[in-house]
């Protein structure tokens, strides 16, 4: 097979994957979560590590959006940080909420909130504070677009602390 033929095959595979991902996301399927969950079944530590890495990526993006003045996107990325952290700890401690998410192949916001409350009892108020700030950003910063720059910056600090504390435990 020639170099050109090989690249065309790679490009068509890439295009097909993009189409599959797009269709899945249109149906409300969280592709990243699905892949992490599948990998986690083989190696739970790998899933936890991937979630922490993803949380760090989202934090960087949240800060970049904030620098650009985009409080709406910053709010959503910050929420994603807390979401990944709660999922990682729920898996680490094998909470009932984690088991439910595995059984249903998806997480619900109420399940994440329940997990955050239980984790807070185990790990400290920083997880509950981070989750509550993230949820505020998700609803009022992202969906409703009602928060200003100062409010987003303030709430983001709680999520940064949540990420830093998580790294101490999960890394």
Image (cartoon, rainbow, N blue to C red):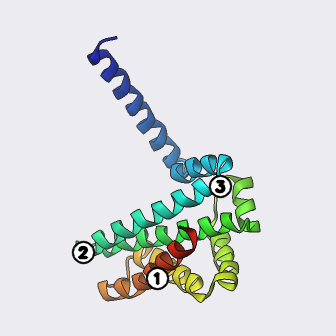
CA distance for labels 1 and 2: 19 Å
Other-residue count near label 2 (Cα within 10 Å), few / some / many at <14 / 14–19 / ≥20: few
Q: Secondary structure at mark 1?
A: helix
Q: Mark 3–mark 1 contact, CB under 8 Å?
A: no
Res. 147 in view: no
Residue 60 in percent (x, y) is at 35, 68
Seen in the picture, residue 18 relative to 140 is either above or below; the reply is: above
- Residue 161: assigned label: 1
Q: Is residue 17 left or right of residue 4?
A: right
Residue 97 in percent (x, y) is at 72, 67
Residue 162 in percent (x, y) is at 50, 79
Q: Earlier in the sequence, mark 1 or mark 2?
A: 2
For the N terminus, the quadrant is top left
Nearest the camera: 103 or 71? 103
Q: Quadrant of residue 100?
A: bottom right
Nearest the camera: 109 or 6? 6
Other-residue count near label 3 (Cα within 10 Å), few / some / many at <14 / 14–19 / ≥20: some
Residue at the image point whose x is 53% and y is 67% from the top:
171
Q: Earlier in the sequence, mark 3 or mark 1?
A: 3
- Marks counted in the figure total 3
Residue at the image point whose x is 67% and y is 78% from the top:
119
Mark 3 = which residue?
Answer: 44
Q: Secondary structure at mark 2?
A: helix
């Amino acid at each position: 097979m020639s170099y050109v033929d090989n690249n065309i095959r790679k490009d068509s595979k890439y295009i097909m994957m993009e189409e599959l991902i797009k269709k899945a996301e249109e149906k409300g399927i969280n592709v990243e979560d699905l892949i992490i969950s599948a990998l986690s079944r083989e190696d739970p530590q790998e899933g936890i590590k991937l979630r922490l890495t993803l949380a760090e990526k989202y934090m960087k993006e949240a800060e970049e959006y904030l620098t650009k003045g985009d409080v709406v996107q910053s709010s959503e990325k910050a929420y994603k940080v807390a979401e990944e952290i709660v999922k990682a700890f729920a898996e680490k401690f094998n909470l009932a909420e984690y088991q439910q998410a595995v059984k249903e192949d998806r997480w619900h916001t109420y399940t994440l909130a329940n997990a955050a409350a239980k984790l807070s009892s185990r790990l400290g108020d920083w997880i509950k504070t981070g989750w509550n700030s993230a949820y505020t950003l998700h609803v009022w910063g992202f969906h409703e677009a009602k928060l200003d720059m100062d409010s987003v910056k303030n709430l983001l600090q709680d999520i940064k602390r949540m990420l830093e504390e998580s790294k101490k435990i999960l890394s």
